[in-house]
Image (cartoon, coloured by chain):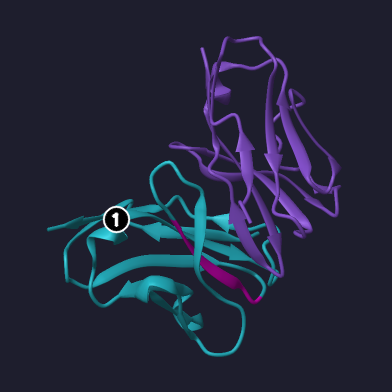
Chain colours: A purple, B cyan
Amino acid sequence: DAGVIQSPRHEVTEMGQEVTLRCKPISGHDYLFWYRQTMMRGLELLIYFNNNVPIDDSGMPEDRFSAKMPNASFSTLKIQPSEPRDSAVYFCASSVAGKLFFGSGTQLSVL
Amino acid sequence: AQSVTQLGSHVSVSEGALVLLRCNYSSSVPPYLFWYVQYPNQGLQLLLKYTTGATLVKGINGFEAEFKKSETSFHLTKPSAHMSDAAEYFCAVSSQGGSEKLVFGKGTKLTVNP
């Protein structure tokens, strides 16, 4: 299995632009998580899904952030409009039987 | 609410020396505890986890951690550091045995000197 696949690997955009981050979880995993990592705040859970259904989005910072999981093999995290303070590494992770697997992350820079 | 405190954002050891990374947790319910490792430009990987039962947990790459309820600690150790252990290590706590609602510490960056 290729593991959790995230794209793009790096994203540089200008303030106000829409950003879409993509994730393909490991096949057969029933949970999917979106995390954000910054130096100041560490690793924060933004939202997670169980069987494609959003369970807890209390970590989503603002209405500018939205996440979808239209099927078991794909999820997106969208930021619209983006702001410089959104610059971070965004990780997607999937899990089954309590074991979490992370993707390599998307490094987002908002100028 | 649950929280994790990792003492020391940076730890430096010599190759072959003992590695000790400290983690203290706060939880109002019996905790499930985890250690993850992050190598540069990669996602986190599970090292080990404690759910119930034996309080000394062995993980990959020679690491182990001991759950001490009286001290609310879950320190990570390795008897002899290797250069390849250089990475950032994260302690995490959950109220459930799965990965839901993991709360991570800020991380400890381990440097191994030759």
Q: Residue A15, percent across and down?
A: 60, 10
Q: Residue B110, percent across and down?
A: 29, 56
Quadrant of image for the N terminus of chain A: bottom right
Q: Nearer the viewer, residue B38 or A1?
A: A1
For this view, does A91 lie left or right of residue A96? left
For this view, does A30 lie left or right of residue B82? right
Q: Is residue B39 above or below residue B26?
A: above
**Residue under pointer 1:** B86
Which is the main secondary structure of the residues drawn in magenta? strand
For this view, does A29 lie left or right of residue B9? right
For this view, does B111 lie left or right of residue B70? left
Q: Residue B1, percent across and down?
A: 65, 59
Residue placed furthest toward the bottom: B54
Q: Is residue B111 above or below residue A68?
A: below
Q: Nearer the viewer, residue A19 or A85?
A: A19
- Residue in the picture at 78% in, 46% down: A73
Residue stretch in magenta? B30-37
Q: Is residue A8 above or below residue B68?
A: above
Q: Nearer the viewer, residue B23 or B39?
A: B39
Q: Is residue B51 above or below residue B96?
A: below
Does the magenta-highlighted stretch encompass residue A18? no
Residue type at mark 1?
Answer: Ala
Q: Chain of mark 1?
A: B
Q: Label 1, secondary structure: give it.
A: loop
- Residue in the picture at 38% in, 74% down: B63
Total tally of numbered discs in the picture: 1
Q: Label 1 neighbourhood size at 10 Å, few (<14), some (14-19), many (20+)?
A: many
- Residue in the picture at 54% in, 45% down: A43
Q: Residue B64, percent across and down?
A: 40, 77
Where residue B73 sits, quadrant-wise, is bottom left
